[in-house]
Amino acid sequence: MKNILNITNGDCAVEIMKKAEIPGVFLPWRDVLHDGPVPENLSLEELSEVRTQFIIGRNWGAAENIRKSFVERDNELKCYGKYEKVILWFEHDLYDQLQILQILDWFHSTPRNGVELSIICTDRYLGMLSPAEMKGLMIHEELITERHLTLSSKAWSAFRSSSPEKWYELLNIDTSALPFLEGVFWSNETGHFIER
């Protein structure tokens, strides 16, 4: 059995994955990146501090708990080398697709030292699945390649750009490596193009 880090979109999914006896350690990625500042040219830790301040300012939890959550999350990610494999478990929606971009952009600029990266991305909401349905998603696991990483870095940079031109340019490139990415170019809620 491989030593695995499972990264997913939140605590609800983690609870179901545990009930499904998915092997490995679980890391929920708790950040609603489409709300609030996501400035460009910041490290993971610097961006986490910006996001921490934003979330504290919205009164979405106790300041100490929010800060601790980001620090622990980032530290676990940076310790990925203690695992043989990292699996991303995410959904098709805007919330999840932006989290995928952030994580894969980080891996794109980080030596992976033989750690295997893969992704399970579905059009079903993970937090609403039964344990059996969650376990059944494992047949959709896909190896992450350089195409995934390059596309993620390009899209993450475009999303964080202070100008919308880079985001618009994504409409003209092949995004099939991340098949749900094209759907986030337009906001499902408003029907308008998302601009940072």
Image (cartoon, grey):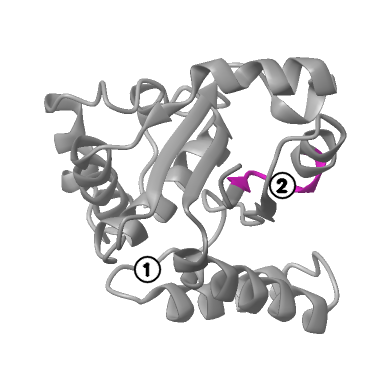
For the point 75% across and 37% down, which residue is it? Answer: 13
Taking the image as shown, residue 54 lies to the left or right of residue 34, namely right
Give the residues drawn in magenta, as a range: 7-12
| Visible residue check, residue 92 | no
The mark found on residue 189 in the picture is none
Taking the image as shown, residue 125 lies to the left or right of residue 110, namely right
For the point 62% across and 19% down, which residue is it? Answer: 137
Q: Is residue 36 above or below residue 180?
A: below
Quarter of image, res 147: top left
For the point 51% across and 72% down, which residue is it? Answer: 79
Amino acid at the residue labelled 2: Gly
Rounded to the nearest angstrom, the CA distance separating label 1 from label 2 is: 23 Å
Amino acid at the residue labelled 1: Pro
Label 2 packing within 10 angstroms: few (<14), some (14-19), many (20+): some
- Which residue position holds label 1? 39
The mark found on residue 10 in the picture is 2
Look at the numbered disc 2 and give the secondary structure of its residue.
loop
Where residue 185 sits in the image (x, y, percent)? Answer: 35, 30
Q: Is residue 144 above or below residue 30?
A: above
Quarter of image, res 160: bottom left
Look at the numbered disc 1 and give the secondary structure of its residue.
loop
